[in-house]
Image (cartoon, helix red, strand yellow):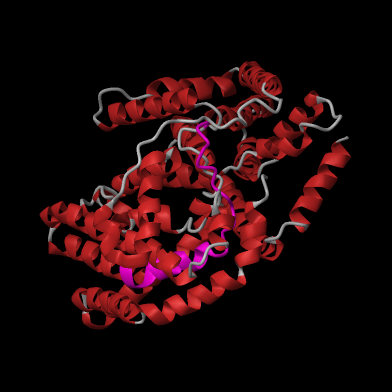
Amino acid sequence: MIKHFINLEWKAFFRSPSFKTNLFFKILLGFAALWMIVSFSFLGVGVYYVIEKELDKDPLVLVNNFLIFYVVFDLVLRYFLQNMPIVNIRPLLYLPIKKGKVVHFALNKTVLSFFNIVHAFFFLPFSVVLVIEGYPFLNVMGWHLAIMALIYCNNFINVFVNSKDAVFYTVLSIIVVLGLLKYYEIFDITDFTAPVFQAFYDMPYLALIPIALLVVLYKMAYSYFKSNFYLDAGLAKKVETVQSEDFAWLNRFGSVSTFLKNDIRLLKRNKRSKMTILMSGMFLFYGLLFFTGAVEAYKGPFWRIFAGIFVSGGFLFNFGQFVPSWDSAYYPLMMSQNITYKEYISSKWYLMVMATIVSTILSVFYLYFGWQAYAAVVVGAIYNIGVNSHMVLWGGAYIKTPIDLTSNKKAFGDKKSFNAKTLLLTIPKLVLPMVIYAIGHFTLGETFGFTLVALFGIAGFLFKNKVFDIIEKIYKSEKYKTLSAYKQNS
């Protein structure tokens, strides 16, 4: 049966309408994974000697002191990037296959996730170095098994976090409270967690506790999904009464106003889109890490423009890169109407531009940190409007993952479109303006660096119609692949 499931997964990948695009990104992700594996391996070997020589401390004790942050960060990263394969069981619901086998396969698929395996490339070399340097083998083995068991516990905690709002909000609240208490030096959680991790080394038999916890979490996940393994569980859409709004003030945009009104209604009514607005608001304060000097690594001049792009473009990145996935539910209907792609693309562009301008105005408080700080935000806004707004629309043509706006199972709604593929497409939008600024900064100074970035943004704005023609052709060429992809439930 397991062989049959693997065969189905294999066929699903190769028969996907976006197979070529997926294959390209799989190759890129493969290189990224290889780089992470090599980096983790070198870190696992080198961290012992760096701590011992540079800090003159016991490497194991220092690592145990920071392990709580490692584990928590791993859980947060999983929530946003690790895809849950549970949705793939829907086509199997009506087939004569035992529920238990399907659920076991889906859960075991998460066990083989890269997010679990990559940690072994740090902890295994580090454990080997500990043994080589004279630490008792049994003690190191107990500590290693305990840590890996906790990593896998994160895997199943993430399964529940993705399925129940209560779990997500509980975990998030605990993280925020503990983080604030440590920041203000009221309470340091490491004073209590470090001895626990050290105990796994001092008393290796205690490794049985996280291993037992892992088994319990697996059983809980299995029971939960098996009990909800039927067609009526979570598949019925909740019907709610909504109030119709006209938004007559948008009529000034002509035919584009129809799409603008739909987008604003979407942003107001759905959990996933509401979180986009919330995340965009949080991006406004992201610049505090760079402009206040709170983080030593972010004090370089190039990080200013990086922060400016983020602060002014929070909505652009959160909303724009998922066009047209936002409309996946009724995209086939739209394509059967007498509308042009240019009108559709223009409506999204206008919405992102308005949000960027609002974000820039709200960010005026950065003047408190000097004119360079707010100049970076303004210049970043100009670049976002002229260049990045086009790039996110262009990239959206290749992101064919549908968004289920009716999903209320997750705290952020359906987040399948937020994955490593969209993350890869975001990188050039951030790196390119930094390179442009660097050219200006090293030639005529920071003022010219800001000017050069702004000029690129203005040039992109002036050639907007030409760029839109190119983007329109791409959307037309990808039209039927996109329609086919949106029809897939998995």
Drawn side of residue 407 relative to residue 468, left or right: right
Coordinates of residue 293 in the picture (x, y in percent): 23, 52
Q: Nearer the viewer, residue 451 or 65?
A: 451
The residue lying at 55 percent from left, 48 percent from top is 329
Q: Position of residue 443 (x, y in %)?
A: 27, 83
Residue 64 appears in view: yes
Is residue 213 depicted above or below 126 in this figure?
A: above
- The quarter of the displayed image where residue 174 is located: top left
Q: Please indicate, yes or no, whether residue 304 appears anywhere in the rendered image.
A: no
User: Left or right: where does residue 440 sit relative to residue 427?
Assistant: left
Q: How many marks?
A: 0
Picture quadrant of residue 187: top left
Q: Which residues are magenta?
A: 385-409
Is residue 397 covered in magenta? Answer: yes
Where on the picture, by quarter, is residue 248? Answer: bottom left
Residue 134 screen position, x and y as percent: 62, 34
- Decide if residue 174 is on the left or right side of residue 325: left
Query: At 54% from the left edge and 76% from the top edge, which residue is drawn?
Result: 473
> Residue, x 79% and y 32% (percent of image)?
94
113 sits to left or right of 57? right
- 350 is within the stretch colored magenta: no
Quadrant (top left/top right/bottom left/bottom right) for the C terminus: top right
The answer to whether residue 273 is above or below residue 441 is above
Q: Quadrant of the N terminus?
A: top right
Query: At which x and y percent is residue 262?
Result: 40, 52
Vertical placement of 78 versus 304: above or below?
above
Q: Is residue 162 above or below residue 245?
A: above
